[in-house]
Amino acid sequence: MATPTLKLPLAPVQFTPLSIIRMIWLHRLAILLIWLVCSAVTAIIVRTLPAEYKAEVSILVDPQKIPNTVVQSMVTTNVQDRLATISQQILSTAQLQKVIDDFGLYKREKKDMIAEEIVQLMRSKIKVSLDRGWTNNTPGAFRIAFTGEDPAVVAQVANRLGNLFIEENMRTRETQVEGTSEFLETQLQDAKKRLDEAETQISAYKLKHNGELPEQMNVIAANLNRLQSELVGNRDAIARAEQSKKVLEDTLGLAETNLQELIDRDTAAAAAPPPAAGPVVRNPEAPAPARVLKDSEKLELQLEDARARGYGEAHPEVKRLKREIATAKAREEKEAAAAAAAPPPSPPQPKQADAAEKAAAAAAAVAPPKILKERGEVVQARERIKVIKDNIEQNEKDVAARTIEQERLSKAITSEQAKLTNVPVREQEMAQIIRDHASLSAEYQSMLAKSTQAKISTDMELRQKSERFAINDPAHVPGKPDSPDRPLLNAVGSLIGLGLGFLIAIAQELHKNRLLGAWELPDEAPVLIHVPRIQPVDGGVVGLWAGWTWSRRFAVVSAVIIPIVAALLAARFYLGR
């Protein structure tokens, strides 16, 4: 009868430290081989990598020399944005291609790469970094680094790039401020043109509506009051002239009646028979012959008539008569003085007087009767009538002139009232025109101030008194390569080989899924016996290579090493770019 077999539950494989150490120990030769091969390949590849040198130029952001409170710069972009723009311009294909041609860069790469790839390769070797300042976290400087194989050429290229940044910054700022100045000048001229048009419109409007403008309202009101006062005064003057005309017409009738009586009397006296010859005896009761009026007296009568018609002392007619009266009196005084200075006529002799009387009597007896010369009273009456008629005629002319003046004043009052009525309309129209003019004037003043500021800012940029870039520390020829870091790469390759050996050993043991030691058994599993390690009789290999042929071992090693070599070669190619 068969003995029953005791089956104990086995615990799953656990990665205990002893198991891992056991795996490593069993495959120590394979791990050592993989580690040595990887380290050797890494060392060979790293040794063949070309050395690259890095040169760096430091550029200082020199602030504006003139305070912003005195001159405001037209370039308001911050340094970061300006650097980004300048970097795009410097790193353009045309700029970099010129630098490559000037310094003869990438001669070896030109055999296998096209121009765009070479420019992209150089662009990847240039690095721009900012140095933050102490205040406001604004950049006070920035650095431009270039990496290449030739140390001297690398330093020259870095300095060239730094100068390009400085020149491009100056050109960009000058272009920006000049463009701003030209734009503002154009806007200023346009604003001035529109302002001139608005001023011309205001002038034309004022000329067209002169007398109806709001600022002339007080003048219009004063003119209206004056015209109304003149109209009332003229109406009163016409009334006085009409009254004076009536008085003069009555006086003319009386004067003509008196003249007619005098003429009739003289005619009757002329028709009477002549008196006997003898001494002429004057009747003491007969009226004395009328005295002939002097010129000054006639003018005084005219002056009285003018005053009777209502003329004041300031009237031109009154002034004229006063001047003529003064002239006439002066002339009469001269004539009187001359007459007084002349010798008196000699009295006639008696015989001569008798002869004259006889001759006169004989002539009177022989000659037919004739009309005697008009007496002074008649002449005076005729003169008075003439003066009265002249005054009436002058009065009529004055009334006609004042009537015309009345019509003129009425029309002027109507015109002034129309102007006064149009003032609110003109005020509203002027308010709109002036509002547009004020807006254009404010715009012009603003553009003028901006244009002046832009010109000052442009002059400041041209004199290099604004913010600018200056080389703080030029690039020097580097003494040691910046890359590759050979110790680091060798260490990394060695660690990769060691880790790869560990992974292969662990994977091999997991694939076999075998018990590595009693510590992997659960606690309740009894251990009956320990079997010591049995060496093969023929001295064969145990562990990872046990039972493997040499071809199989070579295939496994090749499968491990070839990917490692390929990865290292790819890394070398990448680092070489």
Image: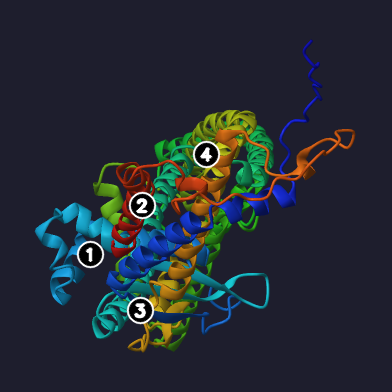
Q: Is residue 245 left or right of residue 175?
A: right
Instruction: Please identify, in this view, whether the residue under mark 1 or under mark 2 is nearer the observer.
Output: 2
User: How far, Cα to Cα, is label 1 from label 3?
Assistant: 24 Å
Q: Residues within 10 Å of mark 3 (few under 14, many from 20)?
A: some
Point out residue 151 in the picture as x, y percentages from the top left corner: 28, 83
Q: Nearer the viewer, mark 2 or mark 3?
A: 2
Label 3, secondary structure: give it: helix
Q: Is residue 367 left or right of residue 34?
A: left
Q: Which mark is residue 561?
A: 2
What residue lies at 50% left-to-right and 53% top-to-bottom? 501
Does residue 445 lie above or below 421 as drawn?
below
Q: Nearer the viewer, residue 216 or 193?
A: 193
Instruction: Residue type at mark 1: give it.
Output: Gln
Q: Residue at 47% across / 42% down in the picture?
A: 390
- Residue type at the position of mark 3: Leu
Residue occupying the far left of the picture: 111
Nearest the viewer among 223 and 405 is: 223
